[in-house]
Image (cartoon, rainbow, N blue to C red):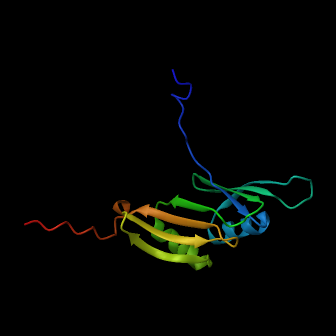
Amino acid sequence: MDPGENSAIVGVAPVFVVDHVARSCGYYTDKLFFSVGFLWSETEGAPPNYAVLEHGTGALHLTTGRPAGAAIAYVLVDGVDRFYVRVKTAGAHITHEIANQPWDMREFEVKDPDGNRLIFAEHVSRISDQPSKPSAATD
């Protein structure tokens, strides 16, 4: 019997490398509506060098180091259109406006101050106010 047979992955949290954890926490809380679940510093009184950010049941971790800005996270959202309006109104750096994609996803992309990219998406089939795809013509 495989010892991992009865186990299941219950979540995956990307770790973004950033220049300044505290500054990045501000961006994620103010512009993308995450909350800070945990901050950690290697030495007492020093600026934090690790953070766990939370949004719904999802988590994103931030750490310092090099190179900053090399990560991409694909984030599934219930209500992507409403979330898009919120983050756009908050002034997030949107690099790709919201649009339906050929792979049946409705997406938009945001870049954080360190260049990390987040693609927020929802399956088009789950969005009730989206027009359905035209069916193929038959002869």
Image x and y of residue 12, in percent: 59, 48
Task: Name the residue furthest left.
Answer: 139
**Residue farthest toward the top in the current orientation of the protein:** 1
* Image quarter of the C terminus: bottom left
Badge count: 0
Query: Dividing the picture into quarters, in which one does residue 88 lie?
Result: bottom right
Above or below 87: residue 55: above
Tell me if 139 is positioned left or right of 120 in this view.
Answer: left
Q: Nearer the viewer, residue 88 or 93?
A: 93
The answer to whether 124 appears left or right of 39 in the picture is left
The one nearer the camera, 38 or 100, is 100
- Identify the residue shown where x is 34% and y is 61%: 125
Q: At 58% across and 55% down in the image, what residue appears?
A: 56
Q: Which corner quadrant of the image does residue 36 belong to?
A: bottom right
Relative to 62, residue 114 above or below? below
Residue 29 x, y percent position in the rendering:
68, 66
Quadrant in the rendering for residue 100: bottom left
Position in image of residue 134 (x %, y %) = 22, 69
- Does residue 19 appear left or right of residue 101 in this picture? right
Q: Is residue 51 above or below residue 84?
A: above
Residue at 61 percent of width and 77 percent of height: 93
Identify which residue is drawn at 42% across, 74% down: 99
Q: Residue furthest front?
A: 67
Residue 112 percent location from the top left of the image = 65, 71
